[in-house]
Image (cartoon, rainbow, N blue to C red):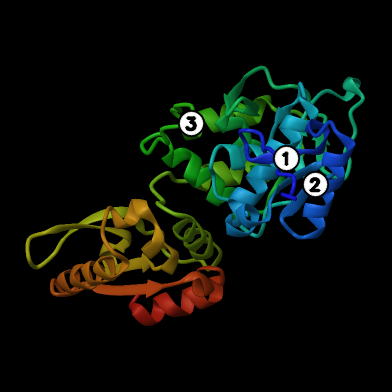
Amino acid sequence: MDSFVATPRRSGLVHTRDIALSNERAEFFNEVRRARFAKIFRGIYIEQGVWDSADADLQYLSKVKAVAERDGTGEIFSHQSAAALWQLPWIDGWPEKVHVTGKRADGGRSNKSVFRHVTGIPDEFEVIEGIAVTTLSRTVVDLARRGTFRQAVVVADAALRRTSHPVDELPSTSLNREELLGELRSVPPRQGVRKARAVIEFADGAADRPGESLSRVGMRAAGLPIPELQARITGASGKTWTVDFYWPEFGLVGEFDGRVKYKDEEFLRGRSPEQALADEKEREDDIRATGLKVSRWGWDIALSPMQLRHHLILAGLAV
């Protein structure tokens, strides 16, 4: 006899309340025990293979969609859950719970799967994949008030960059620092305002990736000179290259070299990882041939201000 096959919703999730017949429900839970399905929240499952093949971003996004489908909530998805829907980077691990914002008078409470913020329904919101979500500016401000400085800078940099690098399937935005400061003034309560303002004033949409944002935070903490971001440099060949960091007064170019970029389709632009690596070597050799120094570092150094300071001083940065 063939096993019962559960039919997922368009999101790929299986809700046990969609399985009406008792014998089919029993067979479905047999499939769960056989590890064919992974439990996301009570009553919501996803195929185990799909879950295992998803990265942390997609796994958390599945949790957000699960709550949206289960609750049909009139609340607005916010904070890290809004960041996931906006495809913004979040470092140090996604939370276990899904975050929504609503009114205190609505009587909703946080539970095992949902953290409810009661700062009030925002006047403006967007809809992504049928889910009501805080605007990009409100999402940045919420996380700047509650997250760590480095978490918030990574989000704010990426959100500001979104204006010049839109994502096709997401609402178009035109975000700037003044809009973020205006959003900060409008959001109750006032807790975390000073930290959020510092994040907004430091944020820069020229930072291309989370590793560059983290490096900037490390430079700030280590008291290092502020570099130019995404500077254009002419190599000895006459070709023009864009570099992550540039200190012209020290003749120093800095590059964050997170190896994950060699798997990133946007970075590869149709090239193989091997070809991209060869192109990077050609690029660096061309820049060095002008007399400029080039320093590279990865995640371990980017995450440690003191290591980054030592690394850049050895490379020729004077402080």
Q: Residue furthest left?
A: 237
SS at mark 3 in the image: loop
Considering only order in the chain, which callout, 2 or 3, is on the residue closer to the N terminus? 2
Point out the frontmost of discs 3 and 2.
2
Say whether marks 1 and 3 touch (CB < 8 Å).
no
Type of amino acid under label 1? Val
Q: Quadrant of residue 10?
A: top right
Type of amino acid under label 3? Leu
Q: Residue at x 64, y 29 (%)?
A: 133
Image quadrant in which the C terminus is located? bottom left
In space, the residues marked 1 and 2 are separated at their CA atoms by 10 Å
Say whether marks 1 and 2 touch (CB < 8 Å).
yes
**Residue topped by disc 3:** 170
Q: Residue at x 75, y 41 (%)?
A: 98
**Residue topped by disc 2:** 28
Callout 3: 10 Å neighbours few (<14), some, many (20+)? some
Point out the frontmost of discs 1 and 2.
2
**Percent coordinates x, y for residue 12 in the rendering:** 63, 40
Q: Is residue 310 above or below residue 224?
A: below
**Percent coordinates x, y for residue 235 in the rendering:** 13, 64
In space, the residues marked 1 and 3 are separated at their CA atoms by 25 Å
Callout 1: 10 Å neighbours few (<14), some, many (20+)? many
**Residue topped by disc 1:** 14
Q: Residue at x 89, y 28 (%)?
A: 108
Foreground pick, 53 / 71: 53
* Side of 39 where 54 appears, left or right: left
Considering only order in the chain, which callout, 2 or 1, is on the residue closer to the N terminus? 1
**Picture disc at residue 136:** none
Q: Is residue 155 above or below residue 36?
A: above
